[in-house]
Image (tube, rainbow, N blue to C red):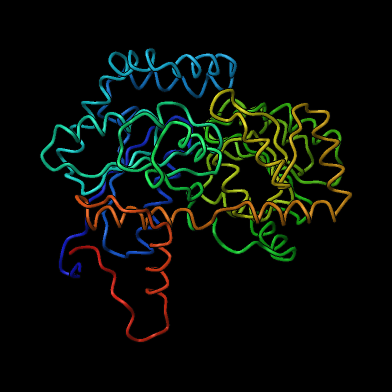
Amino acid sequence: MTSLNEPPIRLLFLIGDTGGGHRSAAKGVAQALDHVFPGCFDPFICDPLRGPGAPCWLRWLTGLYGPTIRVSPWLWGVLWRMCSSPRFLGWLRRTLMSPVYRSVAKAIATWRPAVIVSFHPLTAEPAVRVRDLSAAMPPVITVITDLVTAHLSWRDAAVDRVIVPSAAIAGRCAQDGMPNGHYVETGLPVGPEFSQPPASAPERQALQRSLGLGGRFLVVVTGGGEGSGGLYRRTVAILRKVEDVDVAVICGRNQRVRRRLTRLAEKAGGRLTVHGFVDNMAAWLRCADIVVGKAGPGTIAEATCCAAPLVLTSYLPGQEEGNADFVVQAGAGSHVPRPRDLAAEIARLRNDPAALAAMRAASARAGRPRAAADIAGLIAEAANDPLGWTGPPDPAYGHRQLAALTDPDPDPVPVSLGG
């Protein structure tokens, strides 16, 4: 049992700031650890691809991800498929990605973590390689942050456990020959602010007013961390074709489209608000009548946890393939690739409250708000017994500990993190 006087257990979370989903997932799990096991863990989030320890040319190279998916998503699809070849992936790791191994080795030597958790496909294999050369041998866990289609680089590293977000990726792990118990399905982790109960209609209107809106039918348009997916064209189509709706656009890192939309907002009569990165995304999703965006895994996970109906406009070739079908089959949204059809779909839902309510209920059912706590429990198990961590996974471990911490019984069961 961990004493209150003992220092917290160190963890190393490896990410890459290509898009916003990897860091968001790591932060969600870190917050869940602090909530379920308060004061017991000290996770350090490290980006060996774009962080300060990476060489300038590697930061520049990985920084091309955002412009590529905004301007030439087809090119990204070609590169994604090329790297799906084991031979090409091995060459990439030996050459362009070789500094990642050095950065990971430095982070492990400096931080001395009890568990290493990889939230990016290009950080798991370096973690395993460096770990195997060290004396401490901490467990390595992969948390896959793609929803339906997982690249080979997520699955080929010899990690101790793979945490998957969906049955589709669990099935692919089985096809790869992973033994049952080596991978566990939890859902995609989101921050605690996305895990509140769905807002009622009056609560949504109150939230809208708190955000400076008039309380009308609200369409939130988002393009993920990179602001991709043709935000400008789709916003113009909604404003021109659909009357009596407010539109809020979250542009992420895309400063160019933010400037264009800000000029458009000056002529929109107060119907359009434009934002870059926001720290209250959960509030925007919870009060939205419809969320419009590309089929990014983070957007889908956060929106469904907030019970927001989704109208998906595009998907990134490669890792986002299958995401739109996942949402449509769940009944949580629709897939409308063309801007003119997008406006018609929003008008249809605007005028069909029953259909919109059914979509909202399906979105709530598709959400996995407990995923971060489940993953926190699996990490705690690994930290508890790193050498004997070979038994079946227990994804409900974190929830049982949380129930113990919040039990009104005056003598709660203590959290055990060590033998």
Out of 2 and 396, give the one closest to the viewer.
396
Q: Residue at x 75, y 55 (%)?
A: 214
Looking at this view, name the residue that lies furthest to the bottom: 410
Looking at this view, name the residue that lies furthest to the left: 135
Q: Quadrant of residue 291?
A: top right
Q: Quadrant of residue 147?
A: top right
Q: Residue at x 78, y 54 (%)?
A: 358
Is residue 357 left or right of 276 when viewed as pictured? right
**Where residue 296 sits: x, y (%)?**
58, 35
Is residue 295 left or right of 114 when viewed as pictured? right
**Where residue 76 sits: x, y (%)?**
53, 18
**Where residue 354 sits: x, y (%)?**
85, 56
Out of 246 and 403, give the one closest to the viewer.
403
Q: Quadrant of residue 75?
A: top right
- Counting every numbered tag in the picture gives 0
Q: Quadrant of the C terminus?
A: bottom left
Q: Quadrant of the N terminus?
A: bottom left
**Where residue 283 sits: x, y (%)?**
60, 55
Q: Residue at x 71, y 48 (%)?
A: 309
Q: Residue at x 52, y 20 (%)?
A: 67
Out of 368 and 233, give the one closest to the viewer.
368
Out of 393 and 307, give the one closest to the viewer.
393
